[in-house]
Image: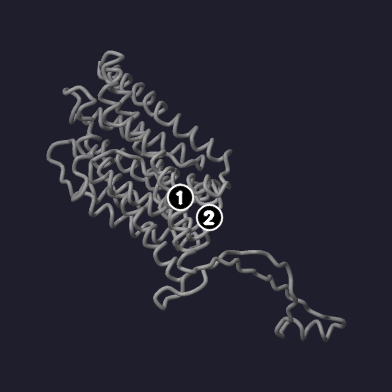
Amino acid sequence: MTYFILLAVVMWLAYGNGANDNFKGVATLYGSGTAGFRQALGWATITTLAGSIVSILLAERLVSVFSGSGLLPPELLGSGTALSIVGAAAAATIMLATILGMPTSTTHVLAGALLGIAWTTSSLSSPWPAFLKLFALPLLLSPFLAISLTAIAYPVLRRLRLLAGITRDSCVCVDEVPVVHATSPVSVALASVSMPQFQLGTIHECGERYEERIAGVDAQTAVNAVHYLSAGAVCFSRAVNDTPKIAALLLALNGHSTYAALACVAAAMAAGGVIQSRRVAETMSRRITDLNPGQGLCANLVTAGLVLFASRLGLPVSTTHVSCGAIFGIGLVQREARWKTIAAVAATWTTTLPLAAVLGACLYRMSISFAH
């Protein structure tokens, strides 16, 4: 019975992770107008599944970290009850953020839930050294590192583009307004079956294009192709980093198949992204800063590189922190950052971890009371 409860909780957590996180990698595609929402979401789903499949080969150490090793007392390691509580507290917190349209971190909520249980089973100061070592430093440093790298990388890439003679021009769209001239019942009937005439309507700027050619290829086409690849790399690296964190709750129970756990988590993550990612997608893509394709590409390259590097070292960084940090960096360089949205995202980050900790501690206390 405990196993099935744990499985249900892990699937709920994985679903919430997908709903909140899957679109983050392709947010720059959607925000820059390179892809529509459905097109970007489809690419995110495919590359996330690919990352989940590969995760077992690159991130084994994360499984140990997120099963509570080094933070929970030995008697709770492998406990189905404790693991279910961690998953339930984390899932409830991340789903709340998703409903509010705020990008949050699965690493945050899992770390918070683990801390809450550790706090209730130890002295007040006992969990903190392990928590700081395992979680706090990577979580605190990663967004600032992403902002710094993006602020350095974007001017360099922009300079290289100008040296290559690639210019960026705005394209202008003209809306066409159908006009039907009808002065009699006969002409009205004819107008209803004939081709409408058109006149010029509203003129507005609808995007930017990179001119010139690179090695015989249109510059805009090349930028779009690399942008797609970089977005896929972010989704892939996020899945490599996040899938073992969630699967760790199942894998901590002895005898459970690694491949089966990863398959369950991957399927639930994909479902969450497809069904419930729209609100977070709008926040990430449209509300932090304006992006053009080149800026989106730069942010994605920084995000993918940092997350893959962290996964290789077994560091539990937050893809949310890194991807938001990279987009923040673009906004800072361009002086177009929307501080109201950034403040709301930062507030979400600072509240989700303690909220998950409180939920974890309360649920664990309730479980002890019911057991007695």
Measured as percent of width and height from the top left, residue 54 is found at: 23, 54
**On residue 325, which mark appears?**
none
| Picture layout, residue 28 above or below residue 203 | above
**Cα–Cα gap, marks 2 and 1:** 20 Å
Query: In the image, 323: left or right of 178?
Result: left
Q: Residues within 10 Å of mark 1 (few under 14, many from 20)?
A: many
Residue wearing tag 1: 277
Asked whether residue 288 is in view, the answer is yes
Residue at 26 percent across and 36 percent down: it is: 6
**SS under mark 2:** loop
* Image quarter of residue 107: top left
Earlier residue among tags 2 and 1: 1
Q: Along the line of sight, which residue is nearer the eye, 370 or 355?
A: 355
Measured as percent of width and height from the top left, residue 139 is found at: 35, 35
* Image quarter of residue 105: top left
**SS under mark 1:** loop
The residue at the far left in this view is 255
Query: In the image, 136: left or right of 81?
Result: right
Measured as percent of width and height from the top left, residue 229 is found at: 36, 62
**On residue 291, which mark appears?**
2
Image quadrant holding the C terminus, namely top left
